[in-house]
Image (spheres, rainbow, N blue to C red):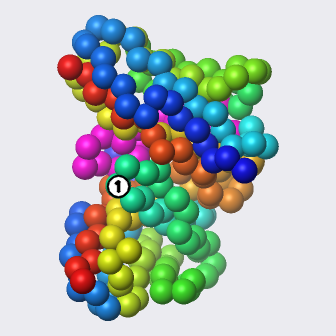
Amino acid sequence: QQQVKQSPQSLIVQKGGISIINCAYENTAFDYFPWYQQFPGKGPALLIAIRPDVSEKKEGRFTISFNKSAKQFSLHIMDSQPGDSATYFCAAVKAAGNKLTFGGGTRVLVKP
Amino acid sequence: NAGVMQNPRHLVRRRGQEARLRCSPMKGHSHVYWYRQLPEEGLKFMVYLQKENIIDESGMPKERFSAEFPKEGPSILRIQQVVRGDSAAYFCASSPLRTGATGELFFGEGSRLTVL
């Protein structure tokens, strides 16, 4: 049972373009939604996170949009740069929970 | 402040052998998590431990896999009688608080197990 579904699996964008990654969740008990960035050969690292009482959160070129009624959230990478080329994972966790549930990941390639 | 340290980074085993993966959490972190990443797939939760206690092992296969986090020393993920399907990257993560409190885990660089 895949509790967090992520799309697309891969994405190619030109430098300066916008990368958009979408996630949908099933469990309404989730109440914190982080995004992780993973470079090849490295472990994932927290990029940005949002709680469901907020519809949007922006940190630099990274923005999370959250639609609680649709149980969907998305990551937008504005002005994408080659250094943003990585795999991005959405995740969800319950406030009283012990584990992150990850989406399947999106491999983003930003072409110069 | 050193990050989460995992070793070995790469491990090759033949079918039927044992694999032992070690993880030292960040200083001050008492919560340790193990995740498995299969090729081209996401991260799957395996087990959550605190010192000397297994808190949640709902993601661990029932057989051949075990984990510990002793009072002294690193956390160990042990896989007995490895099979080809165990080939994966195993990530350890630590946090100062339970995951749900912050949603932030600090991951190591992983141990990549290849079973021949």
Q: Determine if the magenta segment contains residue B41.
A: yes
Query: Can you give x and y, in whole percent of width and height, for residue B57 in the image?
Result: 55, 28
Query: Can you give x and y, in whole percent of width and height, for residue A106 in the image?
Result: 30, 64
Q: Nearer the viewer, residue A78 or A16?
A: A16
Quarter occupied by residue A24: bottom left
Query: Can you give x and y, in whole percent of width and height, for residue A14 in the image?
Result: 23, 86
Question: Residue at image x 36%, y 82%?
Answer: A81
Q: Is residue B36 above or below residue A93?
A: above
Q: Is residue A81 above or below residue B24?
A: below
Question: Residue at image x 49%, y 25%?
Answer: B21
Question: Residue at image x 32%, y 77%?
Answer: A82
Q: Quadrant of the N terminus of chain A?
A: top left
Q: Report whether A50 appears left or right of B88.
A: right
Question: Residue at image x 40%, y 88%?
Answer: A78
How many labels, in total? 1
Q: Determine if the magenta segment contains residue B7.
A: no
Determine the chain carrying the residue at label 1: A
- Residue position marked by numbered label 1 in the rendering: A40
Q: Does residue A27 appear in this view?
A: no
Q: Report whether A13 appears left or right of A20.
A: left
Q: Nearer the viewer, residue A22 or A112?
A: A112
Residues packed near mark 1 inside 10 Å, few (<14), some (14 to 19) or many (20 plus): few
Q: Which residues are magenta?
A: B31-49
Quarter occupied by residue A110: bottom left
- Please name the predominant secondary structure of the magenta segment in the image: strand
Q: Is residue B17 above or below residue B49?
A: above
Q: Is residue B78 above or below residue A83?
A: above
